[in-house]
Amino acid sequence: MKIAVFSQDGKNLGEENFSDSVFSVPKNETLVYLAIKKYLNAQRQGTHSTLTRAEVSGGGKKPWKQKGTGRARAGSIRSPLWRHGGVIFGPKPRDHDIQLPKKADKKAVKILLSDKMSQGKVIILDSIKIDKPKTKDMINILKALKVEGQKTLFVLSPYDKKVVLAARNIKALSVKESVNAYDLLHAENVILSRPAAKRFEEVL
């Protein structure tokens, strides 16, 4: 497919051919959901823990005799029914990760890229050059591309420290070398440098 390529001044430099298999993939909401779920689950530490009645300190002695007191029978002061007792079926340390084939992960990225492309939310940037890492220079680029103030994901390849430093104080802008489905889903606009777009074609 042919996609317009822009300069950092916002000028249209013409169209260039890019792969349909990356930028024109049909929607699959289920696959995207699974990829997002996998990413979010991987962020969970899984260290939450409670004590069962066997793990709570104390409670080894029967509090009173079985019969003759008029009270309900009790075998331990650490019963889950008692204050300071154990917890029934409470959370225990566990791994929340879910398995998803690498191909499925990649396809989810392609689906979201294609969806953004169909909405006109993907901008291919011919190149970016910043002499000094100044926030003002990056804001001027965003203004020229008409995405200032919008939640924007800038995918850069190769890594350029000056660009990253110029962008770090802009709250709505995120600069990354590689992205996942979650990054794409939560961005209003996606800016790809031409090398990054070509790298997507190779990797995906």
Image (cartoon, rainbow, N blue to C red):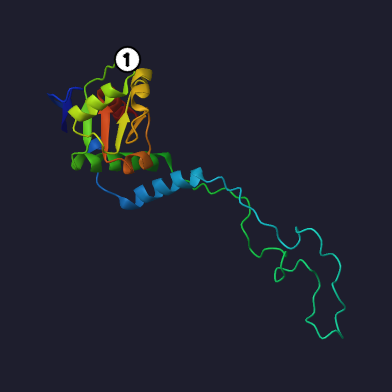
Q: Residues within 10 Å of mark 1 (few under 14, many from 20)?
A: few
The quadrant in which the C terminus is found is top left
* Front residue of 112 and 87: 87
Horizontal side of 83 relative to 6 (left or right) equals right
Horizontal side of 19 relative to 175 (left or right) equals left
Reading the image, the residue beneath label 1 is: 132
**Residue at (72% x, 70% y) in the render:** 82
Residue 31 vertical placement versus 59 (above, below): above
Q: Quadrant of residue 101?
A: top left
* Front residue of 125 and 109: 125
Residue 203 vertical placement versus 33 (above, below): above
Residue 155, image x, y percentages: 32, 29
Residue farthest to the top, as pictured: 131
The quadrant in which the N terminus is found is top left
* Label 1 SS: loop
Horizontal side of 165 relative to 71 (left or right) equals left
Residue farthest to the front, as pictured: 136
Q: How many marks?
A: 1
* Front residue of 55 and 202: 55
**Residue at (66% x, 56% y) in the render:** 50
Residue 61, image x, y percentages: 86, 67
**Residue at (80% x, 79% y) in the render:** 73
**Residue at (50% x, 43% y) in the render:** 43
State whether residue 56 appears in this view.
yes
Residue 23, image x, y percentages: 24, 36
Residue 177 vertical placement versus 71 (above, below): above
